[in-house]
Image (cartoon, rainbow, N blue to C red):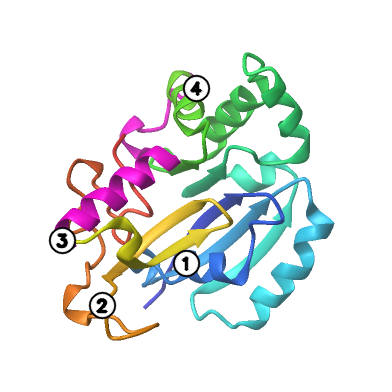
């Protein structure tokens, strides 16, 4: 019986790419029965290569290949998933000095819409996520807009508030909220801390996956970090 190959494109700064990030992506239930072709799209190719070599040595069972490239055509062609951080590269940081100049986002959106599979999913993280997603939605003519997701600090804070309410605790009492890079949160199996001492948790208070996210609809395992905005 053959296996399905899923192409995942990650556009992140070299400082964000890590072994932990690879684990978070490759161990998703949505990818459990698939082999993954992971493309790292970055201008920092030399900076990323060393980390990628470490990822290869981890022997992820579902990793078919991992490629580092700065070429949109190579990365986006027949892609199934795109994970994009809004302060992608040093060259893009200059753009933020003039928020009106978002030509680079239009280029990304047009390229991905043209080259990716029509049912591809897009996840944009960071403070500009809603703006970038709106551009993607306006530019894209082939892609399903229901597959566009934005995750900013506002969405994370709201999700944490809902989880804390569900567990009847304060936000600072939550644990196992994993971080993508320094600022972007990947909420998976959150626990409420107890008074048993440092590092001790009440496993009966675990929130599994997306059971309590309400209107945010964080279907993290089923739909690759899908969050309704």
Report the residue at 21% width, 61% height from top: 169
Q: Alpha carbon of mark 1 to alpha carbon of mark 2: how far?
A: 26 Å
Query: In the rendered view of the protein, which quadrant contains the C terminus?
Result: top left
* Disc number lying in front (3 or 4): 3
Q: Nearer the viewer, mark 1 or mark 2?
A: 2
User: In front: 49, or 140?
Assistant: 49
Q: Dot 3 lies on which element?
A: loop
Residue 85: percent from left, percent from top: 57, 43
Q: In the displayed structure, does residue 209 sit left or right of residue 77? A: left
Q: Which residues are magenta?
A: 139-167
Name the residue carrying label 4.
135
Identify the mark nearer the N-term, 1 or 3: 1
Residue under pointer 1: 24
Coordinates of residue 199 in the picture (x, y in percent) = 39, 83
Provide the residue designation for mark 3: 168
User: In terms of sequence position, does the residue under pointer 4 or pointer 2 come before the other?
Assistant: 4
Report whether 164 appears left or right of 172.
left
Question: Which element type, helix, strand or loop, lies under badge 2?
Answer: loop
Residue 117 visible at all: no
Q: CA distance from mark 1 to mark 4?
A: 27 Å
Determine which residue is flagged by label 2: 194
Give the quarter of the image for residue 173.
bottom left
Helix, strand or loop status at disc 1: helix
Q: Nearer the viewer, residue 161 or 49?
A: 161
């Amino acid at each position: 019986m053959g296996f399905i190959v899923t192409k995942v494109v990650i556009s992140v700064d070299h400082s964000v790419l890590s072994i932990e990030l690879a684990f978070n992506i490759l161990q998703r239930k949505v990818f459990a029965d698939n082999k993954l072709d992971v493309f790292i799209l970055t201008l920092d190719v030399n900076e990323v290569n060393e980390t990628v070599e470490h990822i290869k040595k981890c022997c992820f069972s579902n990793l078919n290949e991992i490629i580092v490239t700065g070429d949109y055509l190579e990365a986006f062609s027949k892609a199934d998933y795109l994970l994009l951080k809004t302060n992608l590269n040093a060259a893009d940081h200059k753009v933020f000095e003039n928020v009106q100049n978002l030509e680079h986002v239009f280029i990304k959106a047009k390229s991905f819409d043209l080259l990716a599979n029509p049912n591809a999913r897009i996840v944009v993280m960071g403070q500009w996520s809603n703006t970038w997603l709106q551009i993607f939605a306006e530019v894209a003519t082939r892609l399903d807009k229901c597959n566009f997701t934005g995750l900013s600090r506002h969405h994370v804070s709201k999700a944490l508030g809902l989880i804390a309410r569900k567990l009847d605790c304060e936000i600072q009492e939550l644990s196992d909220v994993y971080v993508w890079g320094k600022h972007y949160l990947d909420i998976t199996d959150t626990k409420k801390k107890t008074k048993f001492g440092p590092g001790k948790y009440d496993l009966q208070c675990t929130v599994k996956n997306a059971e309590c996210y309400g209107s945010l609809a964080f279907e993290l395992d089923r739909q690759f970090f899908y969050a309704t905005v």
